[in-house]
């Protein structure tokens, strides 16, 4: 709304707005909830990833060319995205939370291989091939292969 070329204010209806929140939680259960007293230690996870999303409608306002803004009302249209994930360092992936917090998937060391080129050393091809062959058939791995010159 304008009065004598002065922007007095405006109303905005954002429909739909997608809100996505990703949080890292510590000492949570497999559903990302806070464990009640007496929860067995193998059901409490040191670190999990909580993903939450919703579609909402939002009515907001702006006064005097944006000097004053705010939200009047928010309505939830859809709120079905609520997932809990774990990070597996040995695989370099995020996946479904294992049935126990003592799972080796949660504590396996990341696979790394470093080789150098130059006089008297290999090009790295044999070392990378050996590392890939050592993976179990069900394992997944990410690899970065390149050349670094100093």
Image (cartoon, grey):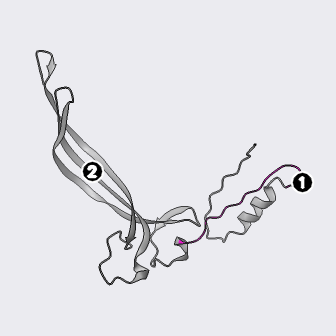
User: Which residues are drawn in magenta?
Assistant: 107-121
**Residue 139 position (above or below residue 123):** below
Query: Is residue 138 shown left or right of residue 41?
Result: right
Instruction: Find disc 1 in the rendering and name its residue.
Output: 120
Horizontal side of residue 5 vs 31, given as left or right = left
Query: Residue 13 location in percent, x, y?
Result: 19, 38
As drawn, 101 above or below 50: below
Q: Residue at x 43, y 65 (%)?
A: 85
What secondary structure is found at the residue carrying circle 2?
strand
Tell me, for residue 55, which label it has, or none: 2
Which quarter of the picture shows residue 120? bottom right
Q: Secondary structure at mark 1?
A: loop
Residue lying furthest top: 4
Q: CA distance from mark 2 to mark 1?
A: 60 Å
Tell me if 134 is positioned left or right of 48 in this view. right
Q: Which mark is residue 87?
A: none
Q: Is residue 113 magenta?
A: yes
Residue 107, compared with residue 68, is above or below; it is below
**Badge 1: how crowded within 10 Å, few (<14), some, or many (20+)?**
few
Relative to the observer, which residue lies in front, 103 or 15?
A: 103
Residue 9 falls inside the magenta stretch? no
Which residue is pictured at 23% across the width and 42% down the height?
15
Q: Residue at the spot x=46%, y=77% of the render?
A: 101
Q: Quadrant of residue 80?
A: bottom left
Compared to residue 115, the image places residue 109 above or below, namely below
Query: Where does the image place residue 126, in percent across and percent down from the top left?
Result: 81, 59
Within 10 Å of disc 2 (Cα), the crowding (few <14, some 14-19, many 20+) is some
């Amino acid at each position: 709304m304008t009065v004598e070329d002065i922007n007095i204010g405006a109303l905005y209806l954002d429909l739909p707005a997608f809100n996505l929140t990703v949080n890292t939680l510590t000492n949570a259960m497999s559903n990302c909830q806070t464990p009640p007293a007496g929860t067995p230690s193998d059901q409490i996870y040191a670190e999990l990833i909580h993903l939450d999303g919703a579609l909402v409608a939002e009515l907001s306002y702006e006064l005097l060319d944006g000097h004053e803004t705010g939200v009047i009302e928010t309505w939830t249209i859809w709120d079905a995205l609520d997932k809990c994930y774990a990070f597996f360092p040995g695989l370099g992936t995020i996946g479904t939370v294992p049935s126990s917090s003592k799972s080796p998937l949660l504590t396996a060391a990341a696979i790394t291989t470093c080789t150098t080129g130059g006089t008297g050393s290999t090009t790295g091809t044999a070392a990378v091939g050996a590392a890939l062959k050592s993976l179990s058939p069900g394992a997944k791995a990410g690899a970065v292969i390149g050349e670094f010159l100093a």
